[in-house]
Image (cartoon, rainbow, N blue to C red):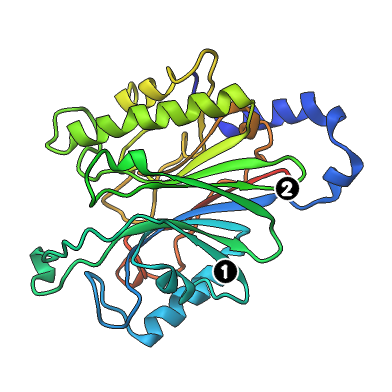
Amino acid sequence: MSRFRLPLLAGLLALAAGCSTTPHQAELPPLKIVTWNMEHLAEANDLGCRPRTDADYAAMRHYASQLDADVVAFEEVETAKAAERVFTPDKYTVVFSERPDSGRHGSCGGSREGLTIRKQDVGFAIRKGVPFTRHPDVRELGVGNPDLRWGVDVTIDVPRPVRLLGVHLKSGCFKGDQGGACPVLLEQVPVLQQWIAAREKENTAFVILGDWNRRLDLPGDRVWLDLGKSAPGVNLVDATAGHSATCEAKYPDFIDHLVMNRAASERFVPGSFNEFTYGVPEDQHPSDHCPVSIRIAR
């Protein structure tokens, strides 16, 4: 498995594949796919580890509109109704994880002492009119822990379908394998390997996107190397490779990733990777993560 700088890779592949694109497909605009960790987005005002007001939700709707996305994978959202406060039902269909609430809501801790953690889950906001099929959640990513997020799995049914798996992996093992959270995150990796192997066997274009809580682009990263062993001949491309994160000055490495297989990366639009940094000072960001996005041909 190799890492490529996507503009060069996609440009070469597009030249090679250009003759197979039908006129109808060439006329369709590319699909914009985003991942966005929304930092403790609660359903109601003044709840969770990042309590919000009506004005805060309105600001997030404004940023969501600026994203102009066809599909958004979101993380750290309490309920489908919470997501719909940002991705309104007149514009988006929300597909939300079916993981039950564990019922354990501890203190947020630190500077947020006195606030209570709400359920954190994964889902998709899919623009109205974009056809899709929902698959069963990848509950195995919970590795037996009711507090760990499942994967949400959909196929976007454009002329050349693309399978999307939204994930939010265990936090605390950002690199290496010695951190206290590493045994759990490393237990989640084989689940992803099995999902990748199944898609490769089907010859399905896919993107695994979300908050990986892992610096996959560091040289020799163990998780990245293990993913490359998921299936014979698998060739994964991380859209963040070759880019530095700028959302928060103290974090130059991405932990939010969009990982494509070859069938999807061949459709990547050169130069389309983007980190959306809100256009305001860091202390005014509506989340501690910035959305990252790509465009792929339909």
Q: Is residue 237 left or right of residue 138?
A: right
Secondary structure at badge 2 equals loop
Q: Is residue 142 left or right of residue 134?
A: left
- Residue 289 visible (yes or no): no
Residue plotted at (21% across, 36% down): 184
Question: Which numbered marker is on residue 152?
Answer: none
The residue lying furthest to the top in this view is: 232
Q: Amino acid at mark 1?
A: Gln
- Where in the figure is residue 101, as x and y percent of width and height? 27, 61
- Where in the figure is residue 220, as x and y percent of width and height? 33, 21
Secondary structure at badge 1 equals helix
> Can you identify the residue that label 2 sits on?
158
**Residue in the foreground of this view, choosing between 197 and 33:** 197
264 to 106, vertically: above or below: above
106 to 85, vertically: above or below: above
> Can you identify the residue that label 1 sits on?
66
Q: Is residue 23 left or right of residue 152?
A: right
The residue lying furthest to the bottom in this view is: 54
- Where in the figure is residue 114, as x and y percent of width and height? 9, 74
**Residue in the foreground of this view, choosing between 268 and 277:** 268
**Quadrant the C terminus occupies:** top right
- Residue 197 visible (yes or no): yes
Q: Amino acid at mark 2?
A: Val
- Where in the figure is residue 174, as x and y percent of width and height? 25, 38
